[in-house]
Structure formats: structure tokens, C-alpha cells
Amino acid sequence: MQFSQDFAGDGYVITAYDTSSITVNGKRFTSSLIISARQIQENWPVSTMQQLQTHHIETFMQYNPELIILGTGSKQRFPAVELYAALSQQNTGIEVMDTGAACRTYNILTGEGRNVVAGIIIDKK
């Protein structure tokens, strides 16, 4: 899906997505990644929800986000309860959704100037 809305600023914006990739500021990524308005961590080593562990969530905390958005691939899949517990101890919210919804939500919230970070899982089937 191609986005047409133009966001002000010079941060990272997800400009397109499909089942095997996302495009950020015109650059296509085919591996899972972490994205914030100012940074991208390419090749995030999580390609399925089953691989997601508490130490992966700790990576998000380096961004000091007010909210973490987790894009789980073509379907919404929820992480283990232990991950929610780790985040609640740090007073950080998490929203879990399919990748398309995560991309749209990320763009809206960063466009509003919110301090969010998204982990986008690209399924390697």
C-alpha cells in the first residue's frame, strides 16, 4: 500500500508497506526493524512473534519512548505476558497490531510529534 500524506519535518516516515517489506523515506526494507522519528535499527533479529523475548524489548527502551508500537506481520499476534510485565515496570505503553495498522499508527503519532518507537516484524516465510 502506498501512502500519499506528506508529513512535515525531516524524520523517518513509513511511505509504503506490503507483506514482505516496508519503505521508509523511499528506502525499501525487507528485514524486521525498529524505527523512531530520528533512528532506524535495521536487521532487528526478530522475524516471528515466537522469537520475541524480554531482551528485545529492552532495545526499545534505549529510545525512551512514551509508547511502543509492535507490528506483528500479516496478523495481529500478542507477545508473552512476561513482555507486558517488563514494560509495565518501566511505565511504557505498548500497542500490538498487524504491520499495516502499526505503520499507519506510527506515521500518525510521529506526525503529531509524539515520542513513539515501532518494532516492525517482517515475516520470513
Image: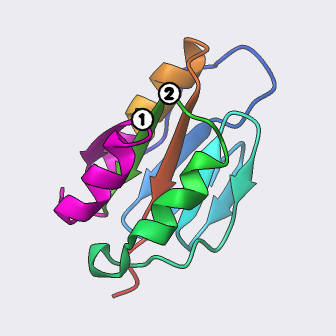
- Which residue is found at the position 50% from the left and 27% from the top? 66
Mark 1 surroundings: few (<14), some (14-19) or many (≥20) residues within 10 A: some
Determine which quarter of the picture holds residue 76: bottom left
The residue most toward the front is 89
* Residue 96 is a magenta residue: yes
Q: Position of residue 114 (x, y in %)?
A: 56, 18
- Give the residue type at disc 1: Thr
- Give the residue type at disc 2: Glu
Determine which quarter of the picture holds residue 68: top left
- The numbered mark at residue 84 is none
The relative height of residue 98 versus residue 68 in the rendered view (above or below) is below
Which residue bears the numbered disc 1? 92
Q: Position of residue 123 (x, y in %)?
A: 37, 76
Viewport quadrant of the C terminus? bottom left
Disc 2, disc 1: CB below 8 Å? yes
Determine which quarter of the picture holds residue 11: top right
Q: Which residues are magenta?
A: 73-102
The relative height of residue 110 versus residue 46 in the rendered view (above or below) is above
Mark 2 surroundings: few (<14), some (14-19) or many (≥20) residues within 10 A: some
In front: 3, or 59? 59
Can residue 105 be seen by looking at this rendering? yes
- Which residue is found at the position 42% from the left and 35% from the top? 92
Which residue bears the numbered disc 2? 66
Q: Position of residue 42 (x, y in %)?
A: 68, 66
